Each structure stands twice: as structure tokens, then as C-alpha cells.
Image (cartoon, rainbow, N blue to C red):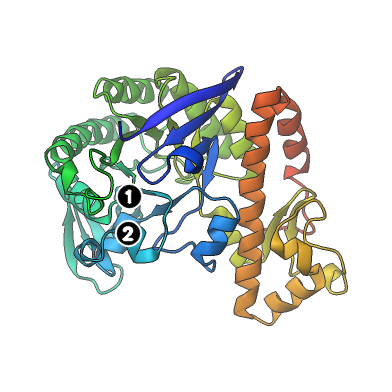
Amino acid sequence: MSLTYTIDAELASARRARLELPHASGPSAIETPIFMPVGTVGSVKAVPQDIVETLGARIILGNTYHLYLRPGHELIRRMGGLHKFISWPRAMLTDSGGFQVFSLNELRKVSADGVQFRSHLDGSSHLFTPERSIEIQIALGADIIMVFDECTEYPADYGRARHSLDMTLTWAERSKTFFEAHKHEVPWAADFPGKTQSLFGIVQGGMYPDLRRESAERLVEMDLPGYAIGGLSVGEPRHLTREVIEATLPYLPKDKPRYVMGVGYPEEIVEYASMGVDMMDCVLPTRAARHGLLFTSEGRLNIKNRRFAEDQGPADPECGCMVCQRYTRAYLRHLTHAQEPLSMVLNTIHNLAYYLDLMKAVRDAIAIGTLPGLLARVRAVAGKASSPIATP
């Protein structure tokens, strides 16, 4: 099989498991619950791949829309696929491009066939259909790829969400049909005989529990190797995000990986893991780092704050990352105010380390039965900050 998912421990709804993929097998298997750093255009912003490896990331994301526009999926195919092109030997996941096309707003036109859109780079016109999205993702060669979907905006009335869901489910079937006909064309086929990519479905349905249930049940009928919950982090209140996830999870198979797309803050990813989510991703730790926002065991720190000007302590006294072991808050503040590129590098390394270490703590807590206590501690520091900070 190209994907195996083995549960090693359970605690209430939470589960600790091993996920094996072509680029993640044996000792390199992915331990879940996992947070996946986002590498939109073939890099996790500001951090070299060897450091991302050192931090413990077993899987990163690539973005179909951006890589299609630049440098182009055919070029990447000729280079041996995205793994070889960016020198990343571990597992990868690519999204379908649906969310990015959704974000273009006035630059797109949706029809039953697909989405016509204009490039944000040069205004050129392009068409993404389910078949085209899968064709591009096969050329990129990620271990996990996603069906093409329409991300329903918020707010959306019931009729709009119903129409969007029906189209997304049709697109999912078309995605699977094209994938099954072309899955052996992946660039690394010769390196992993008999292995293919794994196609995940995406549950949509807006903020309506009955539509989410229907979406999940109909996708499960397609017997895909994994399922994602999409259409979140699109402007809805955070409590509603949780409610949608909670309402959807019971209808997804317990013996297959569950992925929530585009979340979230530290307290949220711990909570979602406790609810039974296996995989999560978000640009928040890297984007926040570029704005001088650090996540720590003491709460969120705006490192630009004047109070850190002569602070000789590390960003997080409980963090063992290479940044906290070497640099002071005073220096990190100086770099940020000087607009020194190194500030983005160091801040991002720390934030990624915090997220990845937090998920390791979640996995350990599931194994030894202490997850409720960990969740309570993370919640307790969630609202703490050195000064008022707007969401990046």
C-alpha cells in the first residue's frame, strides 16, 4: 500500500498513530498528531530545508496554485518532482489550489467545469478543472494530494452552501477518476516501485452541520485513503470553527487519517488533536514570526515591545531550540526593529520549533494519559501576551 495508518495509543477521542508514505516509511514514518509547516512556493519561508529537518518536521506542504504559476509544474516534473527540486527527502502534501483560487475573489469565475482565474502575477488567464489540478499535483509528486474543491466563503446562506457542496462532490469524483487513470505517472515512480500518491477528500458544506455530514458520508463512499475538513479559517468566529470540526469528525473513518486544513493557534491544534484530528497545517507560525510575534510557554510575545530592549533572557526559557539556546530577547528585538532579514529567520525557527515540540508533547500525553492537563496548561497561557497584538 502507498499509505498505511496505524494507531498506537488512544485516549478518549485522541489517538497517537504512525503514518507511512513513500517518502516517510520505517524510522522516517510520520508520527501523528502532526503539525505540518507550510512551504507555499517550495520553501518554508525564511528557513532552509536542513533546519526544518533538524526541527523535526516529517512532512511539509506545497501549494499547487503558486507552483503552477511559477516555476511551472512541467519544469518541476522535468527536475524529478518537487522533492528533488527543493532537496526535501521527506514527505510532502500539496493542496488542490482551490483555496488560493477562492482567495482571488474578483479575479475568478466559477462554473460546473472548473474555475477560470487570472494570475495575481501577470493577469494571464488560466482554467483549473479537477482534472487539471490532479494533473499538476501528479507532476509535482507530493506523497499526499487533494481533490479539487470549492472553498465556500463565510458567510454563505444555506442555498449557496448547498450548491457549492454539490459541485465540490462532483469535482471530487472527477478528481478520483483522473487520478486513478494517471497515478503511475508520478515523477518518482521508478524510485518506489508499486507506490503511488494518496488522494485525500475534502469535506465542505459551509457552517451547516447537516451539509458537513452529507459531504463526509458521500466522500467516505469514495473509499479514499484519507479525509480533510476544509472551508475553515475563512473569516468565521473561532468558536464556529471548533463546532464544525466537532460536528464533522464522527462521520470520518476512525481507521484513516483526518486532516483539518488551515488551523490554527497553539491552543487550537492541541484541542483539535484531543478531538481526534491527526494532521493540521497553518501559515500562522511563519507569518506571525515575520511580524515579530513569538509563541512561547509564557504566552505570545510581541518581540518589538520596548520592555525587551535589555532583556537578557531567551525568547522562551522552556524552549530548547537553537534560537532560545543562543540569542536573547534583546537581540531578537533589535533585529526586528532594524528590519534585519535575520530576524525573520530566527523568529520563524523558534515558532516552528514551538509548534513541532508542542505536537510531540501532545503525542506523548496521549500515550501516558495526561492530555487533558496539557490542554489546560496551553489554554491558560493562550491569552497572555506582552502587549496587545493584532492577528497577523
Q: Which image quadrant for residue 258?
A: top left
Q: Quadrant of the N terminus?
A: top left
Where residue 219 is drawn, which disc sits there? none
Q: Is residue 12 left or right of residue 389?
A: left
Seen in the picture, residue 115 relative to 361 is either above or below; the reply is below
Report, in whole angstroms, how far the alpha carbon at label 2 lies from the one at label 1.
Answer: 7 Å
Location of residue 75 in the rendering, given as x and y in whole percent from the top left corner: 22, 67
In this view, the residue in front, 30 or 129, is 30
Q: Which residue is mark 2?
A: 82
Q: Quadrant of the C terminus?
A: bottom right
Seen in the picture, residue 128 relative to 149 is either above or below; the reply is below
Q: Type of residue at label 2?
A: Leu
The crowding category of the residue bearing disc 2, from other C-alpha atoms within 10 Å (few below 14, some 14 to 19, many at least 20), is: many
Residue at the (28%, 70%) spot, across then down:
71
Residue at the (25%, 74%) spot, across then down:
122
Location of residue 199 in the rendering, given as x and y in whole percent from the top left corner: 28, 37
Q: Type of residue at label 1?
A: Ala
Q: Which image quadrant for residue 162?
A: top left
The tally of labels here is 2
Where residue 142 is drawn, which disc sits there? 1
The crowding category of the residue bearing disc 1, from other C-alpha atoms within 10 Å (few below 14, some 14 to 19, many at least 20), is: many
Q: Secondary structure at mark 1?
A: loop
Q: Earlier in the sequence, mark 2 or mark 1?
A: 2
Location of residue 190 in the rendering, given as x and y in whole percent from the top left corner: 22, 50
Residue at the (31%, 25%) spot, across then down:
215
Seen in the picture, residue 283 relative to 373 is either above or below; the reply is below
Q: Are marks 2 and 1 in contact (CB under 8 Å)?
A: yes
In this view, the residue in front, 386 or 326, is 326
